[in-house]
């Protein structure tokens, strides 16, 4: 299984740990920093998907930096086939 983990800026990077095997399939994890902005992110993500052909894309990050007093947290989004 190939997993692509995306994030916009270095501050959002999180190394995700996956089991070494899912069933009998090896897990390969790749990381992609897309940069800020919808167009830039879409461009780099489409290039990475075309090249790596991942089975699963996991986007991590908050889409915003937390500010003092904020009482909520945005969850990461998940996309799959």
Image: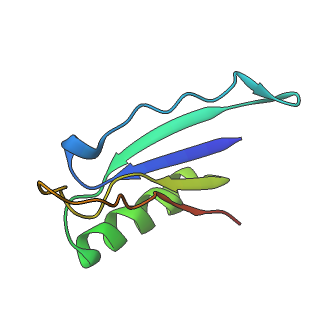
* Residue extending furthest toward the left: 68
| Picture quadrant where residue 38 is located | bottom left
| Picture quadrant where residue 41 is located | bottom left
The image quadrant where one finds the N terminus is: top right
Residue 39 visible (yes or no): yes
Residue 53 visible (yes or no): no
Q: Nearer the viewer, residue 41 or 73?
A: 73
Q: Position of residue 66 (x, y in %)?
A: 19, 55
- On screen, residue 5 versus residue 72, left or right, reads right
- On screen, residue 25 versus residue 50, left or right, reads right
Q: Position of residue 27 (x, y in %)?
A: 68, 32
* Residue at image location 29% in from the left, 57% down from the top: 34
Q: Position of residue 14 (x, y in %)?
A: 37, 36
* Residue at image location 13% in from the left, 57% down from the top: 67
Q: Nearer the viewer, residue 1 or 76?
A: 76
The image quadrant where one finds the C terminus is: bottom right
* Residue at image location 63% in from the left, 54% down from the top: 56
- On screen, residue 3 versus residue 61, left or right, reads right
Q: How many marks?
A: 0
Q: Is residue 60 above or below residue 74?
A: above
* Residue extending furthest toward the top: 20
What colour-coding does the image apply?
rainbow
Q: Is residue 55 above or below residue 20?
A: below
* Residue extending furthest toward the right: 23
| Picture quadrant where residue 79 is located | bottom right
- On screen, residue 55 versus residue 51, left or right, reads right
Q: Position of residue 19 (x, y in %)?
A: 69, 25
């Amino acid at each position: 299984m190939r997993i692509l983990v995306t994030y916009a800026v270095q501050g959002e990077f999180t190394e995700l740990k996956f089991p070494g095997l899912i069933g009998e399939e090896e897990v390969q994890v790749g990381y992609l920093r897309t940069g800020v902005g919808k167009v830039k992110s879409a461009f780099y993500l489409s290039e990475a998907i075309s090249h790596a052909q991942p089975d699963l894309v996991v986007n991590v990050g908050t889409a915003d930096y937390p500010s003092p007093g904020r009482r909520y947290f945005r969850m990461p989004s998940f996309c799959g086939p």
